[in-house]
Amino acid sequence: MPEYQFFFLNRNGVTFGQPLVGDCASDKEAITEARCHVKLHDIEIWEGTRIVTRVEARNRDGTGSSTSPVAAGNGEMAGPVRYLY
């Protein structure tokens, strides 16, 4: 199973803290997992040296989060994650 890294970004888009690491079956699974953890800060998802996508923080009113497409190199939208440690 591929290993994904989840980086928290400050409001300037700079990473901070230690990334979370998780084994996920697919990009789709990694995105689903990131959406469970995104609250105040955007999260960038990486699989090795490939950026998968950025999951944006929830709106100030607490509603939803969105996924920003990031060039994945294959023209497809990235996907989800199951376990973080």
Image (cartoon, rainbow, N blue to C red):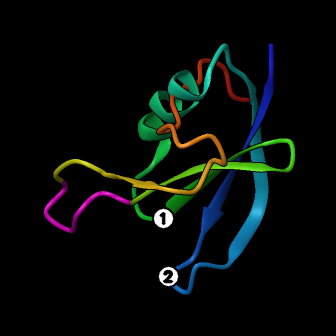
Q: SS of the residue at dot 2?
A: loop
Label 2 is placed on what type of residue? Arg
Name the residue carrying label 2: 11
In the image, is residue 1 part of the stretch drawn in magenta? Answer: no
> Which residue is pictured at 49% across the width and 82% down the height?
11
Residue 44 % position (x, y): 61, 55
**Furthest residue toward bottom:** 12
- Find out whether the residues at labels 1 and 2 contact each other: C-beta distance under 8 Å: yes
Which of 56/28 is in front? 28
Residue 64 % position (x, y): 22, 47
Name the residue carrying label 1: 41
Label 1 is placed on what type of residue? His
Residue 74 located left or right of residue 67 = right
Residue 6 located left or right of residue 57 = right
Which of the two labelled residues, at mark 1 and mark 2, occupies the earlier sequence position? 2
Task: Count the marks.
Answer: 2
> Which residue is pictured at 60% across the width and 69% down the height?
9
Numbered range of the magenta stretch: 57-62
Q: Is residue 10 above or below residue 23?
A: below
Q: SS of the residue at dot 1?
A: loop
Residue 30 % position (x, y): 58, 30
> Which residue is pictured at 45% across the width and 29% down the height?
32
Quarter in which the N terminus is drawn: top right
> Which residue is pictured at 29% across the width and 57% down the height?
58
Residue 3 located left or right of residue 33 = right
Quadrant hosting residue 24: top right
Q: Main secondary structure of the magenta part?
A: loop
